[in-house]
Image (cartoon, rainbow, N blue to C red):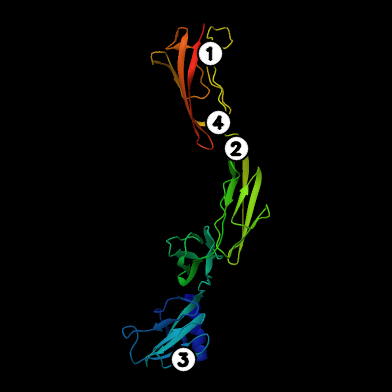
Amino acid sequence: MVKIQYILLFLFAVLYRTSIAQVRSLNLLADTTVVCAGDSALIKFTEDQVNKTATYTWQTPKSIIVHSKQIYIKHKGIHIVKINDGKKQYLDTTYLKLNEKPRLKMRDTVLCGGPLIIAVKNKAYKYAWNTGETGDQIKIEKPGTYWIKANNRGCYHTDTFKVVLANAAVPNFPKEIMVCENEPGKVLSVKAPADVKLFWNTGANTSAINATKEGVYWVKSTSKNCGIKTDSVTIKYKNCDCDIFIPNSFTPNDDDRNDLFSPVFQCEYNYFLLTVMDRWGNTVYTSNNINGKWDGKFKGNPCPDDVYVYRLDAIQKGNDKKITRNGHISLFR
């Protein structure tokens, strides 16, 4: 900027037919002045900087201004001021640089039952949302008024937008549903406002259907504001009346034939407990391992031939059905 100022001194001397010696350079203005596009910066000198009787001539990229102690500048480029205090002429310059204000236009939108992601395209700006987040996108889960402030090197722009809750049906089925074979068909339902249309792959357009057989069921909801939403679920049937086979005797004599006592299951269980007691109510075996087997011993010692009492408690997986079995088991060696 210093070199430019010397060049301007020379041009100024030529233009006004004076010598460079009669023109002095001031260094009161910043080499570069930065403002946001559309704004302006005030340039002025105080009396302790320049004689109050001095006259001013300003040269801007757009015009020449005389007899003004201060001006507002807003056009990009070099701004020159000539100051004449009656004895000497002074020259000072500043270059006005314009930073673009962020361009941001947020639109009101609707929330269709699920989370909504609001994102801005220009990733060069810095952002601040009224939610406290500072990234280029936010996740909105409830209606309300939101605002965002964009910052481009000190130039700011703030915009607000509204998020309203729209009438929508957003199915949210699990991936798979197990249904007992001896129970009625599973009811699949969707809560939908009156202006939302539903269509199932069964051909129904009601809010609920009865899944009477195994397979994949899907439903499509259509609304004016939220468009089309689709969800599906796989229905599988199983035997919920699972038989449990419990032997009534075993022979723990190490001949590899019927040496162990254990129930035989046809279903899976979330909880299992088997307890075996002698005729006096003493517990000789207990296990919560569904694959556990009693070898006819208590604390490593063989139990005598006798009739023992067992109790089995279990909770079936999938439907939380509680099962209790009591009975007798005969031990023969």
* Mark sitting earlier along the chain (4/1): 1
Residue sitting at 46 percent across and 19 percent down? 310
User: How far apart are the alpha carbons under marks 4 and 1?
Assistant: 24 Å
168, above or below 201, in the image? below
Q: CA distance from mark 1 to mark 2?
A: 32 Å
Ranked by sequence position, the earlier of labels 1 and 2 is 2
Q: Is residue 88 left or right of residue 187?
A: left
CA–CA distance in space, label 3 to label 4? 93 Å
Q: Position of residue 28 (x, y in %)?
A: 39, 79
Mark 1 neighbour density, 10 Å: few (under 14) some (14–19) many (20 or more) = some
Question: Measured from the top left, where is residue 35 in percent x and y?
Answer: 46, 76
The disc placed on residue 249 is 1
Residue 57 position within the rendered picture, expressed as x and y whole percent measured from the top left: 44, 90
Q: Which residue is mark 4?
A: 268
Which residue is tagged 3? 65
Pick the residue in front: 332 or 116: 332
Q: Are marks 3 and 2 in contact (CB under 8 Å)?
A: no
Nearer to me, 198 or 140: 198
Q: Is residue 320 left or right of residue 237?
A: left
In the rendered structure, find residue 35 and report the number of the disc placed on it. Answer: none
> Viewer-nearest of labels 3 and 2?
2
| Residue 47 occupies quadrant | bottom left
